[in-house]
Image (cartoon, helix red, strand yellow):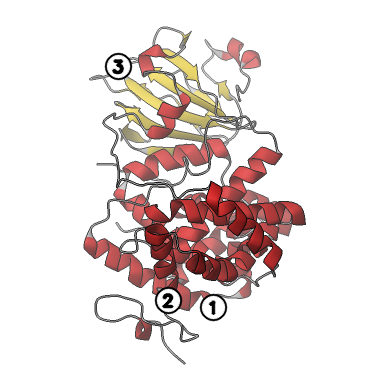
Amino acid sequence: MQTVTDTIDDEGKPLIDADGKRIDEWSECLTLIAQKQDRAAFTRLFRHFAPLMKAFALSGSTLSANHADELVQEVMLKVWQKAGAFNAEKAAASTWIYTIARNCRTDLYRRLQKFDTPLSAEDVSDSQDSEEAFLVLHQKRSRERIRGLIKELPNDQAQILAKVYMEGKTHSEVSGELDLPLGTVKSRVRLALQKLQIQLER
Amino acid sequence: MTNFHPDLELITEYAAGSLPLAQGACVSIHVNQCRRCQRIAGQLTDLGASLFEALQPVPVGDAQLDAVLARLDDEKPLEYSHRKSSPSSTPAILQRLMRGDFSDLNWRNIGSTLRISYLKTGDPDHEFALYHIRAGGRIPEHTHRGTEMTLILEGGFSDANGSYHKGDFLIRRPGDVHAPTALQSEDCICLAVLDAPLRFTDWKFRWMNPFLKLRTA
């Protein structure tokens, strides 16, 4: 078994993932799209991420299959258009793509509910810029750590994180759905974050 | 500077994109001003990406790929010049919701020390309002029927539990009673997001309770 730290070299660069693939393959694709409008790179990204986006669209199950397909197309078009804003030095390609999918799904939900709002989900998400070099490195390490530790979470904690993140539910919605006290839901989230070593600094 | 922050669970809901619009907007303004919360939100977004990558993929046909490829010509990549930092100190989200400045808003006077301006976010379940409390002014004692998020934009206030300053983020739960007083030195402007109306416990103001309705949308 490969440990998490094995995938990071001294500069904190991820080398290969568990399948032996270079983790930064997706960053390269985004860079090729930005610089050369490279359709082959876009196609590679599509084949990997579109099925994940569709799964993400269908989690939470309030979107029809048609809407899920619409979402996949919309997200992939955004990836194409916005590739120039991706900064491989600072962000992981998968996080960048996930963030677009998350925002597009939220906007689609709100359109379907006929929200009349001047704010898009992107306006309301954090800007993720202006990090100093050592913090970028720190975040890279934490990302690799999370990726490794996530598989070891107990089911009851993993289930709640999946509902909050993949189904887009608030803690109180999860509490209602699973018939658990709100305090239990929150403490499971907190325990999971502890295991993943995500904590507030003093 | 900032001493009061959203808790870890709340930032998790925020990073997951699961918060209702008005609450998400309030948390977002704090996070974008606060290094510490921004850092943790970054990690929590990475967590979301890891969960995303671990999903069981659902097959997407080549027809879909072709449909997207066919649309690429119409969708030219956008040009990005790196980071335009806005010169204004007003958070970008508020700039989108207001026309002009704080002084250009429609303010409703509530007594002599407090005025309120309601902003329209489109969230049907939450009131999103700016409170302007005159320096040294006191808001009559009130309790919360629901959850109230408060973010201090200018100045500061104190209540029985402590004193709070620009950038501080506070959350009040149902049943919390307080009577905030603005700092003596300057006026206080804060953003308050409510999911249920306030209820005054101060007897001079109780008559208003039946008229307090949530002003959303």
Q: Is residue B130 above or below residue B21?
A: above
Label 1 neighbourhood size at 10 Å, few (<14), some (14-19), many (20+)?
A: few
**Residue name at image x 36 percent, y 31 percent:** B152
Q: Is residue A197 above or below residue B195?
A: below
Residue A23's tag is 2
Towards the viewer: B141 or B121: B121
Question: Which of the 4 image quadrants contains residue B212?
Answer: top right
Residue A151's tag is 1
Can you see residue B138? no
Q: Is residue A11 above or below residue A182?
A: below
Frontmost of labels 1 and 2 is 2
Towards the viewer: A201 or A100: A100
Marks 1 & 2, CB-CB < 8 Å contact: no
* 3 and 2 marks on the same chain: no
Q: Is residue B203 above or below residue A145?
A: above
Q: Secondary structure at mark 2?
A: loop
- Using residue A95 as the reference point, say whether residue B146 is left or right of it: right
Amino acid identity at mark 1: Lys
Q: Chain of mark 2?
A: A
Q: What x and y, as percent, mark residue B177?
A: 50, 30
Label 2 neighbourhood size at 10 Å, few (<14), some (14-19), many (20+)?
A: some
Q: What x and y, as percent, mark residue A150?
A: 51, 74
- Using residue A59 as the reference point, say whether residue A133 is left or right of it: left
Of mark 1 and mark 2, the one earlier in the sequence is 2
- Using residue A151 as the reference point, say whether residue B188 is left or right of it: left
Q: Disc 3 designates what residue?
A: B135
Amino acid identity at mark 3: Ala
Amino acid identity at mark 2: Ile
